[in-house]
Amino acid sequence: MKQRTFADLEYTAKKRTRRERFLGEMEQVVPWARWIVLIEPHYPKAGLGRRPMPLERMLRIYLLQQWFSLSDPAMEEMLIDSQSMRRFAGINLMDDPVPDESTILKFRHLLEEHQLTEQLFHDVGLLLTERGLLLHKGTIVDATIINAPSSTKNQDRARDPDMSQVKKGNEWRFGMKAHIGADLDSGLVHTLVTTTARESDQNVLPQLLHGGENEVLGDRGYGSKADRAMAREAGIALRTAHRTTRGKELTFQQEFENKVIASLRAIVEFPFRIIKRQWGHTIVRYRGLAKNTAQLHTLFALANLYQVRPQLLSS
């Protein structure tokens, strides 16, 4: 048993904050044992050199970074400053060293190098399917742009070549695009594809399907002739919003169908809202698609767990 400090005693006596309640819920819904089994074969073993930090501690710190949008240096500082984060990570300052930013960085690089975040994302899908929360009957497809710094004030004096510029409405955006396929009934994300911001949504549609759908819903961007031909060949009902054409307005029936499709598609916005508004991931943190894609796999895996936490906590 570790010796309790006066800070621990003070912490248990005070009122729980919203952050602490959130961490308490996620503590219970993250499948720690399953994820550790996936990562452990690639994690450094204790030998003659420096003893590695406990794997579960590093995983917990990595998840804290995602939830609170922290860089590696900021994560190190928060572990020193925040008692709630130290408790979640399992760090007692009297007994345990706080991992420095380079240790935190190396753990993230290990996850990226072995495509482990994608495995974590798929493992959440398997878990939720086993619990009957991910049904795989219909799919909603959608995409969102994640901004990237457009400045060239860097060492290479150049923009990120994996990012691109696109006009959305009357606004020019520079960055990448996250395309998702989500379960029609629950809104849980089962597929993620990333591209530059300029990539057309319809070019990615086949990659967003898991193959067992009988119905696919999408906005106007997915209603091309090629998309409809693909859907007919696969025996899928493709339902997309009707487009207006020059000199021809939508009929009453078409406007009604657009409203129905929009109401059914609304659920696909939830995972985007979670990672962008609640967890602050509105700007890419790294250069290149590969590193940002790895992070997005983690974010959407955690967003899925966050959405179903009431069901998981009650089971």
Image (spheres, rainbow, N blue to C red):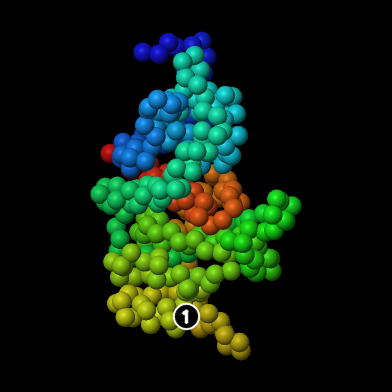
With respect to residue 20, does 162 lie above or below? below
Q: Residue 228, position in %: x, y?
A: 40, 80
Quadrant in the rendering for residue 268: bottom left
Left or right: where 178 falls relative to 151: left
The residue nearer to you, when weighing 75 against 46, is: 46
Q: Residue 131, position in %: x, y?
A: 26, 47
Quadrant in the rendering for residue 190: bottom left
Q: Residue 74, position in %: x, y?
A: 60, 34
Q: Does residue 127 appear in the picture of this structure?
A: yes
Left or right: where 100 falls relative to 2: right
Q: Locate the C terminus and report the quarter of the image it occupies.
A: top left
Residue found at the very far right of the displayed protein? 153
Q: Which residue is mark 1?
A: 224
Name the amino acid, label 1: Ser
Give me the residue at 29% from left, 57% from top: 135
Left or right: where 111 falls relative to 177: left
Q: Locate the N terminus and report the quarter of the image it occupies.
A: top left
Give me the residue at 65% from left, 61% from top: 174
For mark 1, does the 10 Å Cα neighbourhood hold few (<14), some (14 to 19), or many (20 or more) residues?
Answer: few
